[in-house]
Image: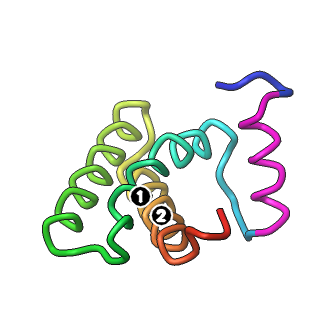
Amino acid sequence: MPPESSPIKELYDYYTQNRVFRLSLEHFTLIVELFPAIMIIMSDGLIDKEEKTHLDRLLHSLYNHFEQDGFPPKKAIELSQFIADEMDYLSKNIEQW
């Protein structure tokens, strides 16, 4: 988890001021770590079938991560879906972020 005052914490604060966002800083850090992958995938302006498959695998890995961290399956699915939704938002608003 990032320290109380770090660039990731500052980004988290900015992001939560501009988005309805209900994840912890720790979970937000996962999005920050995944964002470069979205940038690469979107470099040609769209997400094709193969790239979508890779993203789906990545999001399934997140589900496994949450489940291994002790979240019940329903909560692990909810967290994974929320991150998937945020990644979709970011891919559509990549210029802003």
Magenta span includes 36: no
Please report the residue visible at 46 percent of the width from the left and 72 percent of the height from the top.
Answer: 88
Q: Is residue 7 above or below residue 20?
A: above
Our reading of the magenta stretch's main secondary structure is: helix
Horizontal side, residue 64 vs residue 81: left or right: left
Q: Label 2: few (<14), some or many (≥20) within 10 Å?
A: many
Image quadrant holding the C terminus, namely: bottom right
Residue 11 forms part of the magenta stretch? yes
Asked whether disc 1 touches disc 2, contact meaning CB atoms under 8 Å apart, the reply is yes
- Front residue of 60 and 37: 37
Q: Which residues are magenta?
A: 6-18
Residue 9 place in picture, x, y as percent: 78, 37
What residue is shown at x 69% (from left), y 40% (from top)? 25
Question: How far across and down, in percent of the image, does residue 11 sit?
Answer: 76, 47
Q: Amino acid at mark 2?
A: Met
Q: CA distance from mark 1 to mark 2?
A: 7 Å
x and y percentages locating residue 80 in the rendered image: 42, 56
User: How many discs appear?
Assistant: 2
Residue type at numbered disc 1: Ile
Residue beneath disc 2? 87
Quadrant location of the N terminus? Answer: top right
Would you name the residue on which mark 1 appears?
A: 38
Provide the secondary structure element on which disc 2 rests.
helix
Measuring 80% from the left and 68% from the top, which residue is drawn there? 18
Question: In this rendering, is residue 61 above or below 81?
Answer: above
The coloring applied to the image is rainbow
Q: Is residue 86 left or right of residue 97?
A: left
Mark 1 vs mark 2: give the one in front. 1
Mark 1 residue element: helix
